[in-house]
Amino acid sequence: MASDDSHKKDDKEHLSGDLKGLLGDTVKKVFTAGVSAAFMTEESLRAYVSELKLPKEALNLLIQGANKSKDEMTQRVTKEIVGIIQKIDFVKEASKFAETHKFKITAEIDIVKKDPTKPD
């Protein structure tokens, strides 16, 4: 009986380890999906997490959260870029550029005699 108890204990530890590994992989994939959702379309995100066999409600919740995160990140990046652009003095920058560069303009002019038989 002692060996039977040790087998049960080994089986429980093995199952517990498998469950932890499966749960850990699932959490990793969900986290990765959440982080990379900003760069994925909803369809590609659904395809990515579909192999996790999540309940439909959990999948929808994950996708809603990912879309919300994507929107927030887009708004923040846009706000930062606008803030940076507003701080630029374009006249001053163009003046600096003109002071350190030489402008060369090349033109070609052709003078062609009019044909008196053709109207303009």
Image (tube, grey):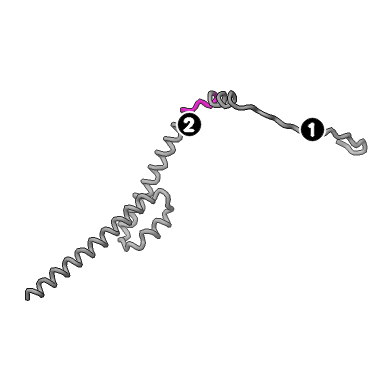
Tell me residue 84's x, y (percent): 45, 31
Quadrant (top left/top right/bottom left/bottom right) for the C terminus: top right
- Foreground mark, 1 or 2? 1
Per the image, the residue denoted by label 2 is: 85
Tell me residue 57's x, y (percent): 31, 57
Q: CA distance from mark 1 to mark 2?
A: 40 Å
Q: Main secondary structure of the magenta part?
A: helix
Q: Residue at horizontal 23%, vertical 61%?
A: 20
Helix, strand or loop at label 2? It is helix
Q: Residue at horizontal 27%, vertical 62%?
A: 22
- Tell me if residue 91 comes above or below residue 43 in the rendering: above
Tell me residue 9's x, y (percent): 13, 68
| Residue 109, disc | 1
Q: Residue at horizontal 42%, vertical 52%?
A: 40
Amino acid carrying label 2: it is Ile
Q: Is residue 108 magenta?
A: no
Count of all numbered marks drawn on residues in the image? 2
Q: Quadrant of residue 16?
A: bottom left
- The mark nearer the N terminus, 1 or 2, is 2
Q: Residue furthest right?
A: 117
Q: Is residue 100 left or right of residue 107?
A: left
Q: Quadrant of residue 60?
A: bottom left
* Residue nearest the observer in this picture, 11 or 58: 11
Helix, strand or loop at label 1? It is loop
- Tell me if residue 42 comes above or below residue 98 in the rendering: below
Mark 2 neighbour density, 10 Å: few (under 14) some (14–19) many (20 or more)? few
Quadrant (top left/top right/bottom left/bottom right) for the N terminus: bottom left
**Residues rendered magenta in the picture:** 86-91
Tell me residue 24's x, y (percent): 26, 58
